[in-house]
Amino acid sequence: MVHVDTSSSRPYHLVIFGASGFTGQFVVEEVARTASEGPKGNLKWAVAGRSKQKLEKVVEQAAGVLGKPELRTEVDIIVADVGEPDSLAAMCKQAVIVLNCVGPYRFYGEPVVKACVENGAHHIDICGEPQFLEGMQLNYSGEAAENGVYIIGSCGFDSIPADMGVLYTRDQFKGTLTAVESFLTVSSGPDGGCIHDGTWQSAIYGFADGHKLQSLRRKFNHKPLPTVGSKLKRRGALFFSNEIQQYTVPFMGSDPSVVKRTQRFVAEEHQATPVQYGAYAGIGGIGNIIKLMFAGMMFWFLVKFHFGRNLLIKHPEFFSFGMFSKAGPSRKQMEASSFQFAFYGEGYSEGQDPTQGKPNAKIRAVVQGPECGYVATPIAMVQAALTILNESSAMPKKGGVYTPGAAFAKTTLVDRLNKHGIQFSVI
């Protein structure tokens, strides 16, 4: 059984580890913004990382941005380092939940997961690296279950909108949903937008290690999930989507991996019909296609070699045509950016036998929200944590390594996100 202890035995409900990192600073602001949503209207929290000085600076910044000078004295600072297991253990013993913002997770994630499992702290990350996420499931799920600890990965833009979006579409469908395709579009304002190069680094190492992910998956010995209804056909590497009226490519992030793991969980644990899933992203017009082709060819060539990976890491702006940068986006750029996932689902209406004939009903749902990397991600991560604290009875009965959909399917996480600007609706 899992125990989410919100009493006084652990001094902090939440500890934000990596709070002085690029994403971590925005998670700090989001926690401060939503502190009244904690247990009994009071959230006890602290920031953690390697440098006390940098952490003090982040708290000071949050106090200024939010107009909350009290943060300077109310928020405690914990010095902890991925390279020092004792410091991680000491941090985890003080937290009900650790919000882990230290990436790339393939290099820095496992010691934090290990410390959480061994010291009884629940763990939430915002990882978009399937190799890390699936590796943690393989290596820690048993021990996490024994210790009654939730390890919940990909709780940011990767992959809460997609994973919870598929479940939301299923729940809104009147009948048996059998397949969903999602189409992501991202909009930016007149100043454009970009992504911090931490995500770029994760992508470089992820593609370089693609073969390791395949061998890792074989270790699970999973049986193929049953296909109900028409088999979902894969689209091409580049096609014009009538759904979003622009050129589109398969989505290269962690969403397909995370959604598939959730669908396996709901099939095996809840005996629900698994939903087939295809993920795509809009890239716009012809000019963007030409840019993407050049960037893609350079990336695929260079990522195979050590010297090439070093070049890609040193010059993210050049090789990504400005999509990634070491400085990350400005607050002004973030304010003018947004995302939208359109989910197109099909299945069998109520009363129809899903084993007979072709699907006869369709549904369209949308998940939309603010800038994905540093506004939507902190919102999703913090609301996931608040859901654990406030709704532990609706969470899985045993600990383990979970996807967001597996962990939060029976909670009000979608309602919480709706109230905070990540909106789920049926069109």
Image (cartoon, grey):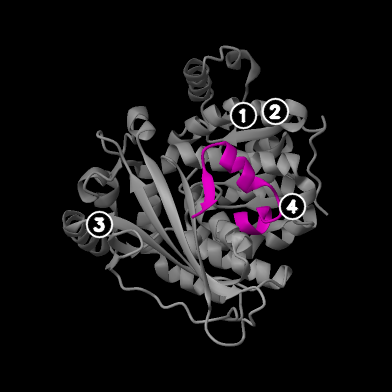
Residues at circles 4 and 1 in contact by the CB criterion of under 8 Å: no
What segment carries the magenta color? Answer: 404-427
Q: CA distance from mark 3 to mark 4?
A: 44 Å
Residue at 31% from the left image edge and 73% from the top image edge:
236
The picture places residue 35, in percent across and down from the top left corner, at: 65, 27
- In the picture as drawn, the residue positioned furthest to the bottom comes out as 356
Q: Which residue is mark 2?
A: 43
Query: Which-is-in-front pick, marks 3 and 4?
Result: 4
Q: Amino acid at mark 1?
A: Thr
User: Is residue 239 shown left or right of residue 92?
Assistant: left
Residue at 44% from the left image edge and 57% from the top image edge:
342
Which mark sits nearer the N-terminus, 2 or 3? 2
The picture places residue 140, in percent across and down from the top left corner, at: 66, 59
Q: Which residue is mark 3?
A: 308
Mark 3 is surrounded, within 10 Å at the Cα level, by few (under 14), some (14 to 19) or many (20 or more) other residues, namely some
Q: Amino acid at mark 3?
A: Gly
Residues at circles 1 and 2 in contact by the CB criterion of under 8 Å: yes
Q: Amino acid at mark 2?
A: Leu
Q: Quadrant of the N terminus?
A: bottom right
The secondary element bearing badge 1 is classed as loop
Mark 1 is surrounded, within 10 Å at the Cα level, by few (under 14), some (14 to 19) or many (20 or more) other residues, namely some
Q: Nearer the viewer, residue 257 or 80?
A: 257
The tag on residue 395 is: 4
The tag on residue 34 is: 1
Q: Is residue 371 visible?
A: yes
Q: Amino acid at mark 4?
A: Met
User: Is residue 44 shown left or right of residue 63?
Assistant: right
Q: CA distance from mark 1 to mark 2?
A: 8 Å
Which mark sits nearer the N-terminus, 3 or 4? 3
Q: CA distance from mark 3 to mark 1?
A: 43 Å
User: Is residue 361 shown left or right of residue 331?
Assistant: right
